[in-house]
Image (cartoon, rainbow, N blue to C red):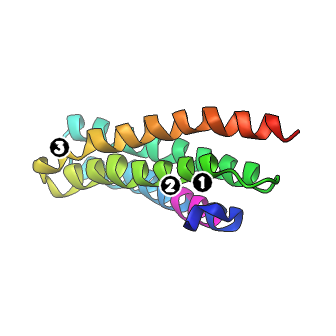
Amino acid sequence: MWFSKPERTMQTAAALGALAVIAGAFGGHAIDRFMPPSDIAVYQTAVKYHFWHALALLLIAIAQWRPPASIWLARSALLFTVGCVLFSGSLYTLTLMNWRFLGIITPFGGLAFILAWLCLIPASKELIKHE
């Protein structure tokens, strides 16, 4: 699994974090020229979730450096990444391209975020067990 290695998790977190900053900068400087205020709010929600979950992914990468490897941390990392793509990605596309049909994908991204957070429960038990 890609996310079983901490360096890969950190690389993914770095890429998602950089993309979140780019999306935020674009949102702060360009979208108000062509997007209605209601869509701007949706776009800003996408940026917030994107950034915070990229940061969560970075923290998982840091936790993964401590042995033993946890399958639950890897699962959480995968689900945070899927959540960023489905949740924030669908909202970005929905607002920028006006493809409203993508709104049906957004809840699946939210579900991925929820499952990612829940995967941290057994991960924490594994980490404590090996202390």
Q: Which mark is residue 121?
A: none
For disc 1, the neighbor class at 10 Å (few under 14, some 14 to 19, many from 20) is: many
Q: CA distance from mark 1 to mark 3?
A: 27 Å
- Compared to residue 70, the image places residue 118 above or below, namely above
Q: Where does label 3 land, which residue?
A: 104
30 horizontally vs 5: left or right: left
Q: Are marks 2 and 1 in contact (CB under 8 Å)?
A: yes
Q: Quadrant of the C terminus?
A: top right
Q: Quadrant of the rendered structure where residue 93 is? A: bottom left
- Residue 78: mark in rendering: 2
The local secondary structure at tag 2 comes to: helix
The N terminus, quarter of image: bottom right
Q: Position of residue 100 (x, y in %)?
A: 12, 47
Tag 2 and tag 3, C-beta contact below 8 Å: no
Measured in 3D between alpha carbons, the distance from the residue under mark 2 to the one under mark 1, in whole angstroms, is: 6 Å
Q: Which residue is found at the position 13% from the left and 52% from the top?
A: 98
Q: Amino acid at mark 2?
A: Leu
Residue 92 visible in the current orientation: yes
How far apart marks 2 and 3 lie (CA) works out to 21 Å
- Secondary structure mostly seen in the magenta stretch: helix
Viewer-nearest of discs 1 and 3 = 1
Q: Earlier in the sequence, mark 2 or mark 3?
A: 2
Residue 6, horizontal then vertical, whole percent: 70, 62
Answer whether residue 10 is magenta in the image. no
- Type of amino acid at the residue the image marks with label 3: Ile
Q: Which residues are magenta?
A: 11-17
Describe residue 98's horizontal placement relative to residue 45 as left or right: left
Residue 44 visible here: no
Question: Where, by quadrant of the figure, is residue 97 drawn?
Answer: bottom left
